[in-house]
Image: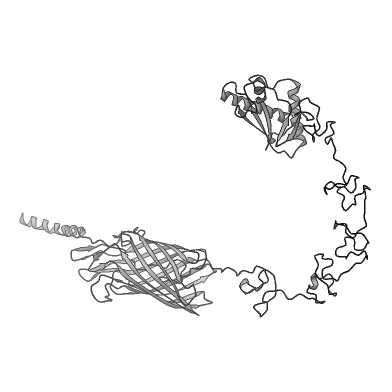
Amino acid sequence: MRKLLVSSLLGVLPLLAASNAFAQTTPAFDINRYHPAERGSEWFSLDTLDFRGMVRPALGLTGDWAFKPLAVPANPGHTTVVQNQFTTHFGGSLVVAERFRLGVNVPMVFYQNGETGVFGAQTFRAPDSTRIADSRFTMDVRAYGRYGDPITIAIGGQFFMPMGSANLYTGDEKPHGIGRVLLSGEKGMWVYSASLGFHARALHVTYAGQRIGDELMFGAAGGVRLLDKKLLVGPEMYMSRETSYPKDFFPGEATPIEIILGGHYTFMQDFRAGAGMGPGFGTAYGSPDFRILGSFDWAPHYEPPKPSDADADGIIDSEDACKDVAGVRTEDPKTNGCPLPAADRDRDGIPDHMDTCPDEHGPASPDMRQHGCGPKDRDHDGILDHWDACPDEPGEMSPDMRAHGCKVKDTDGDGVPDGLDACPTVAGVKTADAKTNGCPTENKDRDGDSIPNDTDACPDEPGKPDPDPKKNGCPVAFVKEGKIQITDQVKFKTASAALEGDASTAAVLQAVADVLTKHPEIKKVRVEGHTDNEGDVNRNKTLSANRADTVVKWLAAHGIDKSRLGSQGFGQDKPIAENKTPEGRRNNRRVEFHIE
């Protein structure tokens, strides 16, 4: 029995130990020390600070393989908890107004492996799956200099969204951020870059004897441009220092350092590929034995805006002394871009190309026929040629400059010279009004309907006599004041939308149709129906709308294009007379034709 208990206990102890170790598994953190540069940079980690363009995007992908980024003390020796970690960093950036840059980077761990180790009472488990890591959002502002200058400075910050898993070594599971100052520049073929930042981490833990928390960060790079500046090669270094570490200024366990030797090649103007590798130094967790990087970016070629040349003479406005007039290039800044001085053979101050008499000294004149010519009177009538409307024919002076210096002509023989005659071919009478001088007296019956204008209610539309002064001389239908006016009503059966069958209603509608046919420029007529105030308000409105629609259908059936017609009923809302008398109510029951 005793032997059985002992053997059973020995068999259970490993399980208890394993259970105890599992219960004390140490929580981890984001071990990747590599932070890719914003897309569009020609370094892997540092930045060339290319802020050119008003709105300029860039996209790219970086592959990152770290070998042995996490090895911890174990019993015995060391255990490589993460031996291989392969990450892709997909990102984009957007430059705005040559001053601001927004960026995003989404890392995805596609593969990682390692071995689980035990150190003291703690178990450090190898990752058993992959996933997205903490994603980064960036904003930088260019503070000094421009791309390609010896010194360019930018300041900015990066915010990391906790999307990774601490147990898988892909995230802190807490927000964290970096504030930074970036420096870049170049001189000839030499290029350099540097950065200084502070990494504020919400995660503060001790992992296998090392502190994980806030860090000071520093980076530097230097290289040369080759192959017509399409290739940039050189080393870059980045490092950090955990701020709460109590030992030396640069203890190996708190100061991870990596160096990458690589290059980036730009091809087809808009695309860039890069490759690099290098070792890690120090014993800080997350610093690999070596790292290999490869990248591919779409970074559109920057075309600087062409200098303005308003007069299109090939000399930019900033150098053009006559920027609104095409000219020629000269060495004198005061005349560069200006036309050559115009020739003036007779030295009268009027350029030959504007001088009517380029070989005869003469004064300027508003009459281009005499501009630059001496005084002349070819017809010897005492009126100088540049004032003479008939310079080759002697004539007389006239207040009308159209006849000044011309013979008096009176084509219609009414005693009013043609130059002053408003109707030179029709005999008329002399008046003080230049618009009627020499014209016949006014026609007293303009429309020829035998009704004098002063009693004709429609003096420009022939009509018939009518005892009603408002209808005297008017046709049944005519255009006036934005409407087709009618002198008689369209009649409907009582409380109905049906037309009365009498001839007068048909005559009114036919007259309206004739007006529309005569005036094709009228594109749209709105037929309005109105009633008096007797009866239900809503019923009156419906009745008026139906009556207007009946009129539209009649006109369409008698040759008027329906697209020119519309209808609307207003019921008793718009009376034109008092509804207190039978005559007033009769006038309110009406149809109107409004031109739209």
Q: Is residue 497 visible?
A: no
| Percent x, y of residue 369 | 84, 66
- Which corner quadrant holds the N terminus? bottom left
Quarter placement of the C terminus: top right
Q: Residue at x 78, y 33 (%)?
A: 458
Residue 391 highlighted magenta (yes or no): yes
Q: Position of residue 259 (x, y in %)?
A: 37, 75
Q: Is residue 257 magenta?
A: no
Q: Point out the residue furthest to the front here.
A: 432
**Which x, y percent locates residue 282?**
29, 75
* Viewer-nearest residue: 271 or 475: 475
> In this rendering, does residue 435 appear at all?
yes
Q: Using the image, determine if residue 471 lies above or below residue 68.
A: above
Q: Residue furthest left?
A: 2
Q: Seen in the image, is 133 located left or right of residue 526?
A: left
The answer to which of 334 and 560 lies nearer the viewer is 334
Q: Is residue 70 left or right of residue 10?
A: right
Which stretch is magenta? 382-397
* Quarter of image, res 475: top right
Q: Residue at x 92, y 47 (%)?
A: 414
Query: Is 387 displayed left or right of 513 in the figure?
Result: right
Vertical arrangement, residue 354 with respect to residue 485, above or below: below
